[in-house]
Image (cartoon, rainbow, N blue to C red):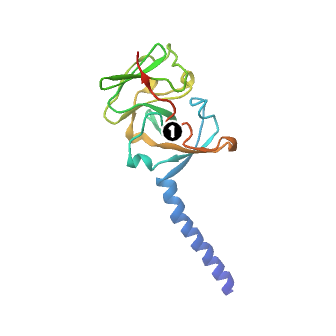
C-alpha cells in the first residue's frame, strides 16, 4: 500500500511541476498558431503549425518586415497573420500597384515579396498614429489586411512568428522574418 501511495504522490508532484512550468510559458511566452487561408502564400501555407513569440514585443517594438499575429481589429476574437509594412507615424501610399512608405522626409518603396499590390483593390493613403502598424498579406490579391480595415493598434498585436514546426520539410526559426528591404522611391 505504501508503494501505491508513493506512486500517486509522485504523479501529483509531476503534474504540479508541469503546470507551474508549461502554463506560464504558454500564457505569456509562446503560443501555437495554425495558419488558416492563403493570404500569406508563399511565405506561409494553409495548415502550417507555428509558434508565436509573445515576449519580444514586451521588450521592443515590431520591426518592418516581421510577420506578426494579432487580433483582428473588427472582431478581436479572431487572429490574423500578416507582415508589418508601416511603422508608427509613417504614411503609406498605395498607387499603381506599389507600396510607398514615407517616414519623415524619406520615401521608399516596399517590394517584398516581389508581388505587386493589385492596383484595382486598395489604392489609397494611410497615415499611422503613434502606436499603429500597417500590415499586408504577402499574397496581396487574396489578403484582407490594412488596406481594407486600416491600421493595427499595438495593443492588438499578440506576437511574432518564431518557429514553423509543421510541415516537417519547412521547419525553421523566424520564417520569412524581415525579408525584403524598402528601396528608395524614384
The C terminus sits in image quarter: top left
Question: Residue 110 versus residue 25: which sits nearer the camera?
Answer: 110
Q: How many marks can you see?
A: 1
Q: Which residue is mark 1?
A: 79
Establish if 174 lies above or below 133. below
- Give the camera-side residue of 57 and 149: 57
Compared with residue 132, is residue 1 higher up or lower down, i.e. above or below? below
Measured as percent of width and height from the top left, residue 68 is found at 49, 38
Res 127 → quadrant: top left
What residue is at 63 percent from the left and 40 percent from the top? 48
User: Image quadrant of residue 6?
Assistant: bottom right
Looking at the rendered image, the quarter that the N terminus falls into is bottom right
* Residue at left offset 47%, top offset 48%: 54
Position of residue 101 relative to residue 161, above or below, is above
Residue found farthest to the bottom? 2
Q: Is residue 130 left or right of residue 40?
A: left
Q: Nearer the viewer, residue 141 or 1?
A: 141
Coordinates of residue 114 in the picture (x, y in percent): 55, 23
Q: Is residue 50 left or right of residue 59?
A: right
Residue shown at the point (52%, 63%) measured from the top left: 21
Quarter residue 17 falls in: bottom right
Estimate the x, y position of residue 171 in percent, counting from the top left.
64, 44
Instruction: Tell me residue 61's x, y (percent).
Output: 38, 42
Q: Secondary structure at mark 1?
A: strand
Establish if 137 lies above or below 50.
above
The residue at the point 43 percent across, 34 percent down is: 64
Residue 142 lies left or right of residue 88; in this view the side is: right
User: How crowded is the residue under tag 1: few (<14 C-alpha within 10 Å), some, or many (20+)?
Assistant: some
Amino acid at each position: 500500500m505504501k508503494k501505491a501511495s508513493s506512486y500517486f504522490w509522485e504523479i501529483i508532484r509531476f503534474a504540479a511541476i508541469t503546470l507551474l512550468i508549461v502554463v506560464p510559458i504558454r500564457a505569456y511566452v509562446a503560443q501555437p498558431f495554425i495558419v488558416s487561408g492563403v493570404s500569406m502564400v508563399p511565405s506561409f501555407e494553409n495548415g502550417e503549425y507555428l509558434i508565436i513569440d509573445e515576449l519580444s514585443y514586451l521588450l521592443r517594438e515590431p520591426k518592418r518586415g516581421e510577420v506578426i499575429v494579432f487580433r483582428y481589429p473588427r472582431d478581436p476574437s479572431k487572429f490574423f497573420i500578416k507582415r508589418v509594412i508601416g511603422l508608427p507615424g509613417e504614411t503609406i501610399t498605395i498607387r499603381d500597384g506599389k507600396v510607398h512608405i514615407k517616414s519623415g522626409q524619406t520615401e521608399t518603396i516596399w517590394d517584398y515579396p516581389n508581388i505587386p499590390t493589385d492596383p484595382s483593390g486598395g489604392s489609397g493613403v494611410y497615415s499611422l498614429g503613434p502606436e499603429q502598424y500597417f500590415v499586408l498579406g504577402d499574397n496581396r490579391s487574396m489578403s484582407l489586411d490594412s488596406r481594407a480595415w486600416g491600421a493595427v493598434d499595438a495593443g492588438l498585436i499578440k506576437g511574432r512568428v518564431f518557429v514553423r514546426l509543421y510541415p516537417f520539410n519547412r521547419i525553421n526559426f523566424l520564417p520569412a522574418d524581415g525579408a525584403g528591404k524598402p528601396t528608395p522611391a524614384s
